[in-house]
Image (spheres, rainbow, N blue to C red):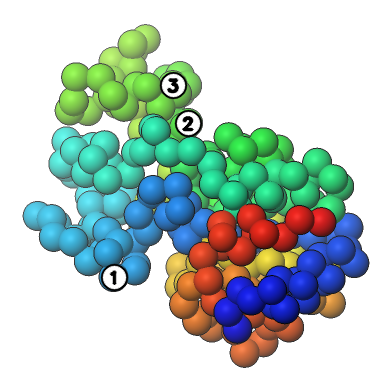
């Protein structure tokens, strides 16, 4: 279904009837902020590098070739000038209203928090948090914009690693448990801007047993056939029109 006025009216009706809403999102919510996704036709997985992105962004590659990892990471994973779009802002507004209980995101860009959301569960970590592998000292994202090469700790000289979940690494157990709790207790779930192709994150959807499942995404997802309501469109454009 396209985001016609009739569809938007139906969506407003669903959302107006709940105060126990959870949002589960992915890269598609940030593409409207200028951050490319990985799997669309113009995403990172369809461009050419010396190594495939999945390889570069793996734990084993990080261990054996940190310089190449950080060259890719700085060039393709950091977007310091990106700003929250209408979707991020709308979700933050719904949280302030008491309707939205949690944002569960696969994104690492911190745009939900920049828009004002407080309860954000980051399944894959955040580029805004960085830690020394030797002493554990914390650094914000500015540490990545130094002189190039491997970012080093100013206290002990150890390598500073982004707090993001690489391929071959496990998701944070505390974040997973909190996500399961919110999903299992939610009345309405919006899945937005995600192809639901990345596991184990996508598998969390199975913990939702509420009354209404809403999917808003440009392309079809594996959950479309199970959803109570589906809109195929850009999530920022859609949510920007859903005033409650």
Q: Is residue 199 left or right of residue 115?
A: left
Q: Is residue 2 left or right of residue 62?
A: right
Question: Residue 100: where, in percent of width, then height?
Answer: 78, 53
Residue found at the far bottom of this picture = 225
Question: Residue 145: where, in percent of width, then height?
Answer: 28, 24
The quarter of the picture where the N terminus appears is: bottom right
Q: CA distance from mark 1 to mark 2?
A: 29 Å
Along the polypeptide, which appears first: circle 1 or circle 2? 1
Residue holding disc 2: 129
Q: Residue at x 45, y 47 (%)?
A: 33
Tell me if I can see residue 136 in this picture. Answer: yes
Between marks 1 and 3 in the image, the one whose residue lies nearer the viewer: 1
Question: Residue 143: where, in percent of width, then height?
Answer: 34, 22
Along the polypeptide, which appears first: circle 1 or circle 3? 1
Q: Residue at x 33, y 44 (%)?
A: 77
Q: CA distance from mark 1 to mark 3?
A: 34 Å
Does 5 appear above or below 193? below
Q: Residue at x 79, y 67 (%)?
A: 12
For numbered disc 1, what is the local secondary structure?
loop
For numbered disc 3, what is the local secondary structure?
strand
Residue found at the far top of this picture = 155
For numbered disc 2, what is the local secondary structure?
strand
Label 2 crowd bin: few (<14), some (14–19), many (20+), radius 10 Å: some
Q: Is residue 2 left or right of residue 243?
A: left
Residue holding disc 1: 41
Decide: marks 2, 3 in contact (CB < 8 A)? no
Q: Which mark is residue 139?
A: 3
How many numbered discs sit on the rendered protein?
3
Residue found at the far left of this picture = 50
Between marks 1 and 2 in the image, the one whose residue lies nearer the viewer: 1
Q: Nearer the viewer, residue 195 or 129?
A: 195
């Amino acid at each position: 279904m396209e985001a016609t006025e009739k569809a938007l009216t139906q969506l407003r009706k669903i959302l107006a009837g709940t105060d126990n809403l959870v949002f589960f999102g992915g890269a598609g919510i940030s593409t409207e902020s200028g951050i490319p996704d990985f799997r669309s036709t113009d995403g990172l997985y369809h461009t050419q590098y010396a190594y495939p992105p999945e390889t570069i962004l793996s734990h084993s590659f990080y261990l054996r070739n940190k310089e190449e990892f950080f060259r890719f990471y700085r060039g393709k994973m950091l977007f310091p000038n990106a700003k929250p779009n209408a979707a991020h802002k709308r979700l933050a507004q719904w949280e302030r209203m008491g309707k939205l209980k949690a944002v569960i995101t696969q994104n690492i860009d911190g745009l939900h928090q920049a828009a004002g959301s407080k309860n954000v569960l980051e399944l894959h970590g955040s580029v805004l948090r960085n830690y020394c592998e030797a002493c554990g000292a914390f650094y914000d994202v500015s540490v990545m914009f130094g002189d190039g090469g491997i970012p080093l700790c100013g206290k002990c000289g150890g390598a500073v690693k982004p707090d993001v979940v690489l391929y071959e690494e496990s998701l944070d157990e505390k974040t997973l448990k909190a996500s399961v709790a919110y999903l299992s207790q939610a009345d309405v779930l919006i899945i937005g801007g995600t192809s639901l192709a990345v596991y184990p994150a996508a598998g969390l959807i199975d913990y939702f047993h509420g009354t209404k499942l809403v999917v808003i995404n440009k392309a079809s997802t594996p959950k479309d056939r199970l959803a109570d309501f589906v809109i195929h469109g850009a999530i920022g454009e859609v949510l920007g029109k859903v005033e409650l």
